Amino acid sequence: METLEVLTVAPLLSPTDLLFQLAESPTHPMHVGGLLIFSPPDSGTFAEVHRALDAAVCRNQIGDFLRRTARRSAATAGLLAWHDHATADVTEHVQRHTLAPGAGSTELFELCSQLHAAPLDRERPLWEMHFIDGLAHDRFAIYAKIHHSLADGTSAIALLRRALCENPDRHDMPAPWEPIATAAKRAKAALPGLGAMANTLVDSAKILPAVADTVTRAAFGRGGPLSISAPKTPFNQDISTERAFAAHSWPLERLRLVAKATDCTVNDVVLAMCSGALRGYLEDSGELPDASLVAMVPVSLRERTDQEAGGNKLGVVMCNLGTNLDNPRARLAKVHGCMNQGKEVIAGRGPVQLLVTSALGIAALAPGVLLGRDILPRPPFNVVISNVPGPDRPLYWNGALLEEVHPLSIPLPGQALNITCTSNHYQISFGLTACRKAVPDPQRILDKLDVELRLLEAAAGM
């Protein structure tokens, strides 16, 4: 039996954050990650970056948000709450790696696959950062991972963004884990009080009957954009502990021009690219189902002023990808209509219903959390596809230019492939994180994404 330790009053995990904690197992870690690739400062060497990193490690200062661990205590009636790990040590979270001479993207992605497969130590704050050198032209990379209960994609990007600046001549920037918030903000964030605890408990109580009603309709295909019923595909199988990762970037302007010419959004174009690529990938092996694949598409509910707050503020839309259609323009029209319908549904929902929609995706996949493993007659959806906006201008860390940002996400039981996109200035990266057993070579899907973008450009008259 777990021992309860007496701690000060701390913020309870929200229902969605709690689900990410409960759904985790040693073989199914629930963290997201990012791979950032930098060119060296104008000095042309990695030595300056090494010095900045060494100094930050020696300071051993960790922002309060990144000192959080989820604990049970008497003060929270045995419920999971965020506890400040005051003795957190930077050296337990920051590691260095050097690639072999001549290594390139393939070797870098393979290292990230291995690092991403390992679960975070839940006795410590739930994050790690790995500095990787040895890339061509003296470039270096940072692979960072953080538990999804601690941050969603939007807040994770904002967290990294705080350590970067637009001035290439500035060399006093903190490390990404160091404190930046004012003392007043820290005090306010650390002590929400009993009123906030009561509100969380009320929301948690309300969510269960709301989930029961929504899941009953959605599981049998009657939920519209909240439906959780999809055809079986090779992506929907039990997963192993091994991960495979690959990524590629395209000029963001190419997607914007297609969106403008077709009166769609960039996110619609992203989904249409994925639709065509997955269709082609499954056609190659003769495993394309007659019914269209369904993607779970997270939709950020954060206000513009709330980007750096932790936790998860997400709605979800179940998007019919139109993979049963052989025309690229028709597939784009299909996802455009489905996403518009989904956004209208989310816009008309109250706080409790939004908790349901944000919980639905993981609830269907977390055995024993809400639904049980074998309740659903078919896969709830076939793939998760998300698009997280990144920086829209050049950024630097102590003189080093951020060249590329590649996202890594979470394969789940029955959901062996995740596609996450992140923009960076003038380009957009598609990061594919998969169970290696189910998708041994995600590069094949990336190749088809390139083909599909060309087809969409042609269909748009470009």
Image: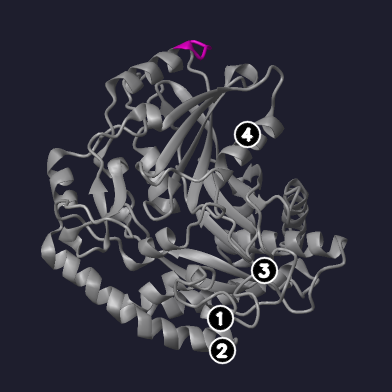
Residue to which mark 3 is pinned: 332
Q: Would residue 14 be seen by someone viewing this image from the given angle?
A: yes
Residue type beneath disc 2: Arg
Q: How many C-alpha atoms fall within 10 Å of the one at disc 1: few (<14), some, or many (≥20)?
A: many
Q: Are marks 2 and 3 in contact (CB under 8 Å)?
A: no
Q: Is residue 328 above or below residue 156?
A: below
> What is the spatial separation of the Cα atoms under label 2 and label 3, in whole angstroms?
23 Å
Magenta segment's dominant SS is loop
> What is the spatial separation of the Cα atoms under label 4 and label 1, in whole angstroms?
37 Å
Residue type beneath disc 4: Leu
Element carrying mark 2: loop
> What is the spatial separation of the Cα atoms under label 2 and label 4, in whole angstroms?
43 Å
Q: How many C-alpha atoms fall within 10 Å of the one at disc 3: few (<14), some, or many (≥20)?
A: many
Q: How many C-alpha atoms fall within 10 Å of the one at disc 2: few (<14), some, or many (≥20)?
A: some
Q: Which mark is residue 400?
A: none
Element carrying mark 4: helix
> What is the spatial separation of the Cα atoms under label 3 and label 4, in whole angstroms?
35 Å
